[in-house]
């Protein structure tokens, strides 16, 4: 039986979908899309297949739009028992991506004057009991209303079909988890309140409103509320992993989380939704700007979540995204407004967030970064680490916000006193000051983009990007996500010689020296064979180890290979090659002595008995998976860029939560 299951799992079948008649404006625009060049399609197909080959999978559908080019493909099986392949037409539970649909519906009604962003939510949902504080629709859209999330399996494992009143009754008597406006509290229940407000303001049921005002205009032909009673053979059967095997998902009726996680759609539908957002077909540009701008707490701390979307910088790209996870599914939607890119991924296997993030990252590298693998920097010296992170954050916040404001619907904060801002930035990255307390200095750097700190990183970095564009031309900006933060900084210094910039806008001499030194060392530490492939993706990583060891020897700065090396070690462990596994873990620690994950992985293998697995049990006796709607958040949660810190960020938590 296991052999048969494994054989089914490795199938990567693709079935084309006939193009039905398109009647909506959004669908009509889709018919004008053209395929990517053949070599790009091969690269996209290869990267997905390579990722799926690394572990068990059921069905997966992937879609990409870049400008007027489109690629959509299905892999694996949407129904293992009946050997039905996943296709672009396959529908999956959307889980928390539903929140993005709900946010669009709310903002449409705000535009029509039927809802008010800053009025008490109970004005539209009076049946929700009065709490110790009032909260607004605006706060609910940004998870700042204090409404709690699922607080245990009892409140999340609903198996009954509920109407709106029944869904609200599940949490109506629960107290608020925080004072509104003071804390980011991710909440599906809060979005259920927004769904109830949509019904009251529009006079229509939530599902009917979405179909008429969101799904229809966007050309989402197969999107609807998820109802097990109306499923057909195109709907994916859900699975979860248990002790190395795939077993059916536990039953959950998602009507209880209707506006926060209760929809189904295909990847083609998700692409249509993303394209409609970028083309302002559902809400105008001014509203899109509000939805894509990160909100902040009362104390001036960004949540990296706007209205229905996580919003954050990634290697100089401005990302607008949402993910979802719940029984039967894992889903991901990523949009880059400045580059006109939409990525949609959905699977009928639970707990696939890591794999989907890796796939989306590789797609971005393929489309926008010349296929180069972007890696974090590993710094030996703690002072160097703080200085480098400051340079990296200047790059990612500055370039991403500049592009979002000039190529997308975004807006920059007021630049204010730029000479004073540059002086503050140089002081923040002063080596002598950092050396007094590197950890405190690192925290200051990581907070420098916050409104309470005057949005320092955004203002300074955006001015740098503007200077580079004026001096070197718009096309030059496309290079920096490929070349990285050090090239961004050193090119700015060169541009300042050409313009020239006032002395006050050139940073301190010591910071200039640090940047040039880092750039030189970084270039020397590269391994040419690993520029476009990850170490765990090559056929024989052992053959590349001498070159990798030589390139990184005696350097204060080199690419971070921890994740890639740990994956190699993990695969060797699964194959029973314990000595080789131990050798790769020892290499990982030697190359990255500051890495806690590397040290922990090595210690775990060195302790006898920690690798033993419990005996298999029949699927019927497998314990129930917690269905509290949220996925566990790993250390590398979210779409982490080379220029972001390893510390967990709010939007990464938001992007991981289930619906």
Image (cartoon, rainbow, N blue to C red):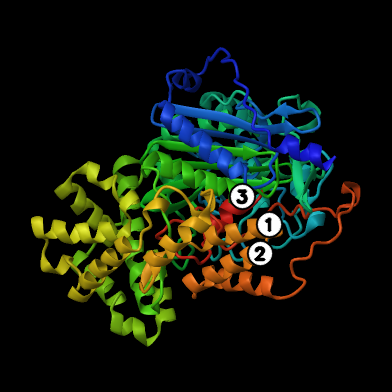
Q: Closest to the observer: 211 or 544?
A: 544
- Please state the horizontal and vertical placement of residue 444, each as a whole percent of the image: 39, 74
Taking the spot 47% from the left edge, 22% from the top edge, the residue there is 30
- Please state the horizontal and vertical placement of residue 648, each as a whole percent of the image: 53, 64
Marked residue nearer the N-terminal end (2 or 3): 2
| Callout in the foreground (1, 3) | 3
Q: Residues within 10 Å of mark 3 (few under 14, many from 20)?
A: many
Q: Residues within 10 Å of mark 2 (few under 14, many from 20)?
A: few
Marked residue nearer the N-terminal end (1 or 3): 1
Taking the spot 43% from the left edge, 66% from the top edge, the residue there is 549
Q: Looking at the image, do the residues carrying marks 2 and 1 touch, with CB atoms under 8 Å apart?
A: yes
Residue placed furthest toward the bottom:
436
Q: Which residue is mark 1?
A: 149
Badge 1 marks a residue whose secondary structure is: loop
- The circle on residue 353 is 3
Q: CA distance from mark 1 to mark 3?
A: 20 Å
In the drawing, does residue 3 fall left or right of residue 388?
Answer: right
Q: Residues within 10 Å of mark 1 (few under 14, many from 20)?
A: many
Q: Which residue is mark 2?
A: 177
Q: Looking at the image, do the residues carrying marks 1 and 3 touch, with CB atoms under 8 Å apart?
A: no
Displayed quadrant of residue 522: bottom left
């Amino acid at each position: 039986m296991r052999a048969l299951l494994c054989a089914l799992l490795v199938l990567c079948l693709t079935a084309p979908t006939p193009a039905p008649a398109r009647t909506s404006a959004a669908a009509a625009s889709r018919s004008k899309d053209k395929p990517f060049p053949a070599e790009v399609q091969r690269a996209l197909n290869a990267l997905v297949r390579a990722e799926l080959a690394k572990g068990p999978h059921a069905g997966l559908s992937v879609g990409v739009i870049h400008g007027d080019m489109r690629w959509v493909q299905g892999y694996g099986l949407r129904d293992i028992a009946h050997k039905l392949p996943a296709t672009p037409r396959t529908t999956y539970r959307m889980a928390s991506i539903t929140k993005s649909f709900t946010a669009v519906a709310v903002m449409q009604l705000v535009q029509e004057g039927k809802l008010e962003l800053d009025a008490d939510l109970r004005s539209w949902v009076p049946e929700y009991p009065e709490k110790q504080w009032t909260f607004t629709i605006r706060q609910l859209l940004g998870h700042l209303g204090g409404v709690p999330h699922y607080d245990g399996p009892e409140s999340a494992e609903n198996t009954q079909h509920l109407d709106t009143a029944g869904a609200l009754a599940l949490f109506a008597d629960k107290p608020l988890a925080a004072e509104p406006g003071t804390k980011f509290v991710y909440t599906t229940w809060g979005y259920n309140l927004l769904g109830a407000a949509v019904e009251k303001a529009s006079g229509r049921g939530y599902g009917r409103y979405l179909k008429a005002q969101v799904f229809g205009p966007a050309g989402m032909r197969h999107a609807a509320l998820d109802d097990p009673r109306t499923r057909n053979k195109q709907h994916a059967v859900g699975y979860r992993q248990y002790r190395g095997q795939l077993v059916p998902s536990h039953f959950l009726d998602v009507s209880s989380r209707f506006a926060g996680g209760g929809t189904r759609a295909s990847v083609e539908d998700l692409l249509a939704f993303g394209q409609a957002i970028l083309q302002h077909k559902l809400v105008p540009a001014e509203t899109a700007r509000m939805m894509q701008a990160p909100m902040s707490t009362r104390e001036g701390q960004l949540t990296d979540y706007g209205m229905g979307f996580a919003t954050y910088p990634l290697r100089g790209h401005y990302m607008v995204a949402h993910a979802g996870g719940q029984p039967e599914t894992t889903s991901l939607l990523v949009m880059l407004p400045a580059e006109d890119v939409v990525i949609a991924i959905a699977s009928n296997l639970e707990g696939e967030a890591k794999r989907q993030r890796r796939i989306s990252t590789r797609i971005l590298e393929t489309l926008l970064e010349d296929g180069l693998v972007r890696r974090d920097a590993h710094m030996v010296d703690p002072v160097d680490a703080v200085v480098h992170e400051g340079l990296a954050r200047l790059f990612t916040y500055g370039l991403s916000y500049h592009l979002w404001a000039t190529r997308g619907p975004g807006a920059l904060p007021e630049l204010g006193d730029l000479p004073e801002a540059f002086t503050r930035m140089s002081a923040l990255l002063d080596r002598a000051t950092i050396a007094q307390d590197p950890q405190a200095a690192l925290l200051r750097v990581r907070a420098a983009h916050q409104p309470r700190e005057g949005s320092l990183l955004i203002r300074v970095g955006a001015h740098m990007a503007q200077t580079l564009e004026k001096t070197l031309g718009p096309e030059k900006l496309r290079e920096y996500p490929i070349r990285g933060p050090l090239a961004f900084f050193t090119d700015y210094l060169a541009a300042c010689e050409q313009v020239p910039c006032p002395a006050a806008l050139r940073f301190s001499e010591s910071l200039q020296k640090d940047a040039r030194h880092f750039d030189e060392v970084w270039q020397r530490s590269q391994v040419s064979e690993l520029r476009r492939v990850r170490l765990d993706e090559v056929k024989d990583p052992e053959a590349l180890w001498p070159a990798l060891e030589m390139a990184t020897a005696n350097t204060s700065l080199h690419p971070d290979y921890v994740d890639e090396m740990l994956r190699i070690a993990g695969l060797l462990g699964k194959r029973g090659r314990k000595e080789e596994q131990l050798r790769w873990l020892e290499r990982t620690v030697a190359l990255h002595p500051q890495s806690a994950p590397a040290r922990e992985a090595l210690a775990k293998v060195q302790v006898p008995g920690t690798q033993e697995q419990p005996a298999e049990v029949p699927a019927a006796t497998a314990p129930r998976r917690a269905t509290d709607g949220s996925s566990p958040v790993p250390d590398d949660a979210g779409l982490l860029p080379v220029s972001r810190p390893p510390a967990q960020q709010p939007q990464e938590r938001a992007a991981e939560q289930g619906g």
